[in-house]
Image: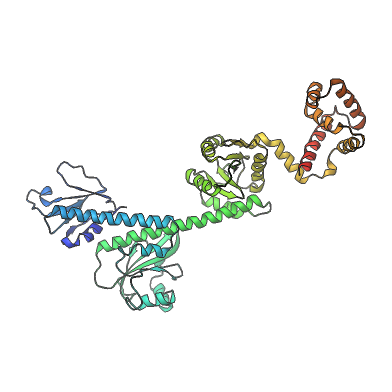
Amino acid sequence: MRLSMQIFAYGLREFHPQAEIRSNAFEIEAVRLFSANVTMEKNTLYIGRLSDLFKNGNDSVICTHRNDLLQLDTTDLEEVLNRVLDVLSFYTSWDTAMMNLITTGAMLQDLFDASEGVLRRPVFLLDPLQRHLAHTQCYEVGEVDEMWDILLTSGSCDMEFLLAFNEADPERITRKGIYSYEEQYFPNESYHYNFIIQDSFLGSATLIVLDGDIHAGELDEYSLFCSYIERWFQLHIQEQDNVILDAQIRTVVSDEKADASELRRRLLLLGWQEDDPLIFMKLDAPLQPYSINTHLAHSLNMAFSHLYAVTLDLSICLLCNLRTISPGETKRQLEPLLSSAKYYAAMGQVFHLEDSFYDNYQYAEVTSEYCEKKVGEVYEGKNYVLPYLLEQMKSSILPDTLHPALKILRSYDDEHHTDFYETLRIYLKKERNIAETARTLHLHRNTLLYRLKRLGELVPDDLNNDEVRLHLLLSFEIAQKYEDE
């Protein structure tokens, strides 16, 4: 919380300060007594006597910050110090309350209500369509002016007034900072503040002066208050953007036919580039009886700037941008967090924005299905290419395209109570190694040789042909997947 010299001048008005304020920067967040050998810090308000600065000065108390000076009508240094500390404590407490409200999902009216000690004049807040959002509730209908009454009773400003005002100042929604008008457009003197974020006009606040002049410190208070409203809008926009982005990512990784153009556009707006290398990860927690997916996704988004995490069913989907960091470094950074949270991760393959989000997330899903699922590990998809290819083939291949030998051997085994199907499968997986095949099947070598001779009679194709063996191996793997389902 950083305050201006005018705010302290207003807080010390009981001492009738004579002010010489030039910079009035919002920098003050500490206070200390002035001494001759002190090195002045830009964030500190110093309190002393006029004689501390000038040889001919008297004992009047002064407050100084940079080139700003307040000379107070008192010699009671302790009383001024206590009053300054009270001012600092008040605004610090207000800052804590406002930030808590902003970060815990409070409504705009809650921010107004928490600022009653700061907003001593009528203030109202309108959205871009000039509809009422919030106001200082200590002023009721009949206590301010006609515009205030219309706003509180109808929920908007008077339409005729708005049309005339827009015509008189067509550039008003582009103004920044606090501004007012020399001409009396409003029933009373007023000060306005526009909320413009990412070049979008989100609304405006108006402070109404009912009783003559307004102290510059009050305007600084108003400016501080508006900065909190601005933070609320910023956080609200970010949350809305995140909700939209979350939904878009969930859609494109779950629906093969989903249009990903809007997601690509949004990622480009976030600073990603069309040629950035991207990679998907899928995080799961196999050992936990409950899910902390939402909390972990939030932690990942806060901790890493090169990835975006969303919850997806019972998992977490990570979309990582590898423009400035390698997959290996990403893996190294994630592993400690995965270990502490008791998750493991499956990493897909590198792709780009124009590629299919669906296909590339499927790669990560297949990797997750076939990996060892050890907590704290990040499994790379390149080590699970064959299971991935088999999964893709299974989804598109027809059972009739499998090698006919499988059906022949199944029928023969069922009819004669033999085991030629499994014998051929293991024989091919062991790359036709007699000793390894016999050991795996727990057969005597001569028994295996007999079976292989008989297999040569049952299988119509030549097993010395590498294309035949590949067809058979793939058929066995795909058939196994059908059986598992």
In the depicted structure, whether residue 412 falls above or below residue 302: above
Q: Which corner quadrant of the image does residue 383 belong to?
A: top right
The percent coordinates of residue 263 (x first, y second) are 58, 53
Q: Which corner quadrant of the image does residue 425 belong to?
A: top right
Residue 53 left/right relative to 452: left
In the depicted structure, whether residue 221 falls above or below residue 312: below
Residue sitting nearer the eye, 396 or 105: 105
> Is residue 272 in view from this perspective?
no
In the depicted structure, whether residue 179 falls above or below residue 161: above
Which residue of the protein is positioned furthest toward the front in this rendering? 289
The percent coordinates of residue 300 (x first, y second) are 51, 44
Q: How is the image coloured?
A: rainbow
| Residue at horizontal 65 percent and vertical 43 percent from the top | 365
Residue 464 left/right relative to 87: right
> Is residue 163 in view from this perspective?
yes
**Number of disc labels:** 0
The percent coordinates of residue 324 (x first, y second) are 51, 39
Residue 136 left/right relative to 462: left
The percent coordinates of residue 330 (x first, y second) are 54, 37
Residue sitting nearer the eye, 254 or 168: 254
Q: Which corner quadrant of the image does residue 155 belong to?
A: bottom left
| Residue at horizontal 50 percent and vertical 46 percent from the top | 301
In the depicted structure, whether residue 366 falls above or below residue 109: above
Which residue of the protein is positioned furthest toward the left in this rendering? 56
Dividing the image into 4 quarters, which one contains the C terminus?
Answer: top right
